[in-house]
Image (cartoon, rainbow, N blue to C red):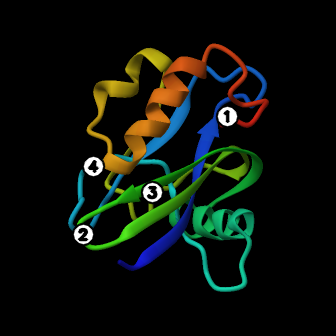
Amino acid sequence: MKTIRVAAAVICDDMDNPSRIFATAKGYGEFKGQWEFPGGKIEAGEAAEEALVREIREELDTEIEVGALIHTIEYDYPAFHLSMDCFLAKVTAGSLTLKEAQAARWLTGSELYEVPWLPADISLIRILEKRMAGDVCQSRVE
């Protein structure tokens, strides 16, 4: 089975005390309308953090600072294996303009299950739900 490596940004309103995280709904493809954390494929020779900065610039016309790695998700979709490095991030410039997604929301911890997440993202949602009131934006979660 083919492995696709991607990086995803958990954009926080505040990396020290997050109360909201930014999520987007896919605007195309098989999973159109399902929610995810923005990001994309890691190109050959590219570090995950570099890919994330590039992808967020392309998808959201926004500059970010990439923080700590929260979790790496390994998930088998029917046609491929997904390996997704999920990083904390904060906006440093720009206004999160949707170029590919069909919708976006800032979600609080109590709102995390109000959107239909992509299957691979559910394990990260569980981590964020448990940790949003704590220090998820300060330390890596194993």
Q: Residue furthest front?
A: 1
Which amino acid is tagged 1?
Answer: Val
Image mark for residue 29: 2
- For disc 1, the marked residue is 141
Residue found at x 23% / y 66%: 78
Residue 126 placed where, x, y %? 45, 28
Q: Are marks 1 and 3 in contact (CB under 8 Å)?
A: no
Residue 24 placed where, x, y %? 41, 48
Q: Are marks 3 and 2 in contact (CB under 8 Å)?
A: no
Left or right: 118, with 47 as reference point: left
Which amino acid is tagged 2?
Answer: Gly
Q: CA distance from mark 4 to mark 2?
A: 10 Å
Q: Few, some or many C-alpha atoms within 10 Å of disc 4 (few <14, some 14-19, many ≥20)?
A: some
Residue found at x 62% / y 13%: 133
Dot placed on the residue nearer the N-terminal end, 4 or 1: 4
Image mark for residue 98: 3
Q: CA distance from mark 3 to mark 2?
A: 16 Å
- For disc 4, the marked residue is 34
Q: Image quarter for residue 75? A: bottom left
Which amino acid is tagged 3?
Answer: Leu
Residue 9 placed where, x, y %? 60, 50
Q: CA distance from mark 4 to mark 1?
A: 25 Å
Mark in front: 1 vs 3: 1
Dot placed on the residue nearer the N-terminal end, 3 or 4: 4
Residue found at x 61% / y 41%: 11
Dot placed on the residue nearer the N-terminal end, 4 or 2: 2
